Amino acid sequence: MIYTLRLKNLRERIGLSQSKAGKLINLDSGTYSHYENEDIIIPIKHLITLCNYFNVSLDYIFNFTDKKNYENLSTSDIDRKLMGSRLKEFRKENKITQIKLAEILKACQSTIAEYERGTNLIATPFLYTICKKYNISADYLLGRTNDPKYLK
């Protein structure tokens, strides 16, 4: 995934240390440093907190667009039910079964079912893979925006 460069640039642009960035997501600077260097994959909930702080979209952080923000971007927490229904809608639009999506993501079918029920937040690498492969907005899938749905 490619989110580290944009996170680092945003952080440095406002003079925020790794330590202070870590505190934003209730972690120490060492853990944040591992996230920023992609030694450890940052969970979606932490990415969203950072997106809200920097006032940028997740699509921007993921390097899917150069547009930093969308007019109607919600900065609230992720609505798991909406996320689940949008994932299911996306899957059906593309005629992909839960089993097929699980194969694409190298995951279990039950994991996809849990995402669609809103039981669990979608894992960062799974969200990134879906969005990258199908040009769908990560912010849309997470319910943070209604537009755009698909990226160019």
Image (cartoon, helix red, strand yellow):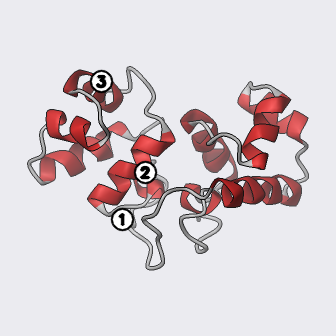
Identify the residue at horizontal 70%, vertical 52% (top origin).
Answer: 134
On the rendered structure, is 97 left or right of 16? right
Instruction: Check disc 1 and report its element: helix, strand or loop.
Output: loop
Q: Is residue 150 above or below residue 88?
A: below
Q: Tell me the kind of residue under disc 3.
A: Thr
Q: Earlier in the sequence, mark 1 or mark 3?
A: 3
Q: Is residue 147 above or below residue 89?
A: below
Q: Tell me the kind of residue under disc 1.
A: Lys
Task: Give the alpha-carbon distance from disc 2 to disc 1, as whole Å.
Answer: 14 Å
Q: Which residue is mark 3?
A: 31
Identify the residue at horizontal 45%, vertical 28% (top origin).
Answer: 41
Rendered location of residue 34, percent (x, y): 31, 23
The quadrant holding residue 35 is top left
For residue 7, the mark is none
Q: Nearer the viewer, residue 36 or 2?
A: 36
Instruction: Check disc 2 and report its element: helix, strand or loop.
Output: helix
On the rendered structure, is 71 left or right of 136? left
Q: Nearer the viewer, mark 1 or mark 3?
A: 3
Question: Is the C terminus in the top left, top right, bottom left or bottom right quadrant?
Answer: bottom right
Q: Which residue is mark 2?
A: 48
Q: Nearer the viewer, residue 53 or 65?
A: 53
Rendered location of residue 86, percent (x, y): 73, 59
Identify the residue at horizontal 49%, vertical 42% (top origin).
Answer: 44
Q: Which residue ends up furthest to the bottom in the rendered image? A: 71
